[in-house]
Image (cartoon, helix red, strand yellow):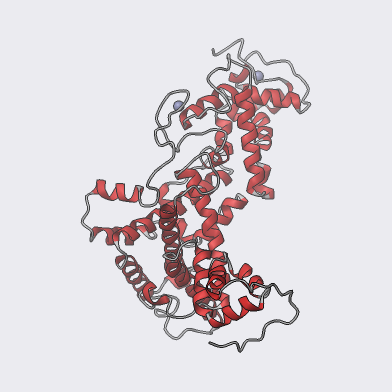
Amino acid sequence: MSNAVPFPSNTRVMSFSGLSEDVLHQVLSQLPDPKTFAATIRASKQLWNIRCAHPKSIARSVAENTCGHPEVLPAALRLVRKVIKGDDADDETEPEDEVENGIVIPQEPPETEILDIPITREEADLLDNYGQVVRLLQDVYSWRHKDRTSATSQLTPAEALHFKRGMYRFWLYCECYSPPEYYAEVNSDAREAARERAADEFLRLLPAEHLFEMAAAAAFCAEMYEWNHTAWNSTDLSHLPASLARGRSCLGPRLIWEDFENLGCDQPENADNSGFFWTSFERAVTHLQLGQQTRDDRLAHAIVKEVVGTNDSCDRCHAVRGTDLWGSTDWPLLRGFISLIDFTTFLPGRLPKNTTETRPLLNRLGSEFWVTGVPRAKADELITSVMEEIIDMEVDGGGIWTRDGWYCLECVHELLKERLWRWWYAKKRDDGTPEMPSCWYGYNCRTMIHRQAHAAKLNHLCVPTRGDP
Ligand SMILES: [Zn+2]
Ligand SMILES: [Zn+2]
């Protein structure tokens, strides 16, 4: 026991004199993060003394709280130690052996020994910082895969443990084995071979359950990358093949999260399109000798054990779609499935090619965000209000579509085909665009595509009265 560290003199002193040392130790162990912990021990001399008497165990408890679960801490701590070590290595000049430098051989130190070394304040702060990203990712994961009615995590404690541990390990995997940023560094075959061996070893050492939860976290990062790509994309190529998204998930959880929040989509220089993570996963999983169906099932259920509303069906076509249903609480997530360019393709006839209509329509749907950047909340609000306005329209007898209904993606497409052009016509009137005479050929007009003067002079958001039916 040592009270050698002096108690800060300029602090307001709180008294816990009625409480035993055990209880106060418990109080400190329950604090959620290093900042609260630092503030608390400065508020009471008794707490300060207890912290000085048990610095390691209390720091460890707070770190466990920061990560969300004691069993997550080893994986999280290993990540932050790799990051700190990596930053230090950047300061050194000219590493002597390129193969050894920059590649952590995963079993040194293994997670089982990582807690033997006490946690420093720098590590505690970094755990807090990384923990926030993982918690926010968990919210989106839960929204998309557990309970579509809530944008904050509804995972059970056991599901959250799988998610977090898998995510921290995938993050470490990205830190260690992502392709190097510059092509020059790739050219060492020895380095590449060492990287591949180390990556395989990392996965081979995991118990099967942990291997699948890590793969589920990796799959989610690829899914989010794909989502970002579609939500951000301003070209016809809105949808990225899943294999490319998997390769680009080497960006790691933080960048993918930041892109999600800011409607961006980073393009990693050297993304390995031949299967970042997944080739090593294939080799690791082959050792388990499982049938394809068992493997697929274990991957699909590695994190969430029970989905809320798993048998819910579409209110229009009655297809059972569970979390793949769209409605009032998850319209914001639709942006990763229907890009803004996709929206314009739902206009009838030849209107998708009439830029006199599509440019301002895209603008109304938020295309300026591509250039200006915008926090996600604003884009979420916009898509929600657009979808609700379209649903509320009193056309074609209404009926099927209601604000509190749930619809599958195919039916959402039908809704947009039926009503987007009418909504856009009404919006233009609301925005003060003067009424123009309707072209006889309506939305099927050919002239509007190649003669801008014609497109600007007449209204084409109308049913044709001549020409093609
Ligand atoms: Zn449907
Ligand atoms: Zn016309």
Say which residue appears at 39% left-offset and 52% top-offset.
303
Say which residue appears at 57% left-offset and 64% top-offset.
32
Judging depth in this view, the residue of 388 and 463 nearest the camera is 388
Judging depth in this view, the residue of 446 and 400 nearest the camera is 400
Q: Residue furthest front?
A: 18
Classify 465 as above or below 34: above
Classify 403 as above or below 157: above
Image quadrant of ligand 1?
Answer: top left
Q: Position of residue 439 (x, y in %)?
A: 67, 16
Left or right position of 233 against 206: right
Question: Can residue 99 be seen?
Answer: yes
Classify 360 as above or below 198: above
Q: Position of residue 140 (x, y in %)?
A: 52, 48
Judging depth in this view, the residue of 414 and 253 nearest the camera is 253
Figure label count: 0
Left or right position of 145 against 454: left
Q: Position of residue 128 (x, y in %)?
A: 56, 66
Say which residue appears at 41% left-offset and 54% top-offset.
158
Q: Position of residue 365 (x, y in %)?
A: 65, 36
Left or right position of 351 against 187: right
Say which residue appears at 66% left-offset and 86% top-offset.
6
Quadrant containing the C terminus is top right
Question: Can residue 275 be seen?
Answer: no
